Image: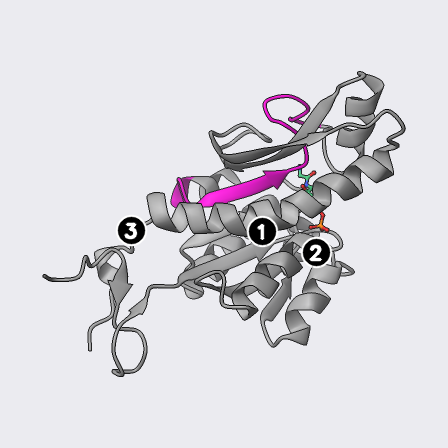
């Protein structure tokens, strides 16, 4: 019986067949713990993917440090650095195309992805958000502000969501979601930490889910022995 091309590719230098590995670009703005969770699962052989490049709008982001530490290209790229929104967008697109990225992962990325990039990578950009979308999403709901709003509203449940990215903040269809209880004595910081621990499992799981259900390597990128 022949192997399905979608699931297997001869990418091991001719020694046999290995499962295809997704090429990821990770965009992050802050501490990069979600990036680290993905890197750890790859290193432990639990996730068949490779992080080809890490891009941050923030030159001080620990995500850039984490990438450099393991020899992954780390790029500071922002509208300010690019000089204009149009140059930012075309530069980002060039980087993603240069690295032959299969999936763009927003892991704590606090900027809107330019529409040109959303269109070019339609269905191939995912974002992790620290709430149960569609609740507590959209402009203004990011990082700690999400947890402050959840507690202020007296919610008993919050959680984390990985969703496909479209032109609006926190808007595209949900790929995976996990609930997390809000406890009576929670502060925004304790809730954030409980949700972050779940995010660290959810994001790698969502990447694996994407690979299994939604991804087919374009014919032009298939490798032949
Ligand atoms: C995570 O909680 C992520 O869900 C959130 O920022 C944090 C980044 O943490 N993202 C958003 O709020 C996007 N709307 P990290 O830098 O340690 O991965």
Q: Which mark is residue 102?
A: none
**In the rendering, at what x and y percent does residue 33 appear?**
70, 55
Spatial CA distance of label 3 from label 2 is: 28 Å
- Of discs 2 and 1, which sits in the foreground? 2
Marks 2 and 1 in Cβ contact (< 8 Å):
no
Q: Is residue 25 left or right of residue 35?
A: left
Majority secondary structure in the magenta region: loop
**In the rendering, at what x and y percent does residue 114 appear?**
54, 41
Compared with 27, 23 (above or below) is below
Q: Which mark is residue 216?
A: 3
What is the span of residues highlighted in magenta in the rendered image? 119-139
Q: Which residue is mark 2?
A: 32
Q: Which residue is mark 1?
A: 88
Figure quadrant, ligand 1: top right
* Point 84% across, 19% down: residue: 152
Marks 1 and 3 in Cβ contact (< 8 Å):
no
Q: Callout 3: few (<14), some (14-19), or many (20+) C-alpha neighbours within 10 Å?
A: some
Please tell me whether mark 3 sits on a helix, a strand or a loop: loop
């Amino acid at each position: 019986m022949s192997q399905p091309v979608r699931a297997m590719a001869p990418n091991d230098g001719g020694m046999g067949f290995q499962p295809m590995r997704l090429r990821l670009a990770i965009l992050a703005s802050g501490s990069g713990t979600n990036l680290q969770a993905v890197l750890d699962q790859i290193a432990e052989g639990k996730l068949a993917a490779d992080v080809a490049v890490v891009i941050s709008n923030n030159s001080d982001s620990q995500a850039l440090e984490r990438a450099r530490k393991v020899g992954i290209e780390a790029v500071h790229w922002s509208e300010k650095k690019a000089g204009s929104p149009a140059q930012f967008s075309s530069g980002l697109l060039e980087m993603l195309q240069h690295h032959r990225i299969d999936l763009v992962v927003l892991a704590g990325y606090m900027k809107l992805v330019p529409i040109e990039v959303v269109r070019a990578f339609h269905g191939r950009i995912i974002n992790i958000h620290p709430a149960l979308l569609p609740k507590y999403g959209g402009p203004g709901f990011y990082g700690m502000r999400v947890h402050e709003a959840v507690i202020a509203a007296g919610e008993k449940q919050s959680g984390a969501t990985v969703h496909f990215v479209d032109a609006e903040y926190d808007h595209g269809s949900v790929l995976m979601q996990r609930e997390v209880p809000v406890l009576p004595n929670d502060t925004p910081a304790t809730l954030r930490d409980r949700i972050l621990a779940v995010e660290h499992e959810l994001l790698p799981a969502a990447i694996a889910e994407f690979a299994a259900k939604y991804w087919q390597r374009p014919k032009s990128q298939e490798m032949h022995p």
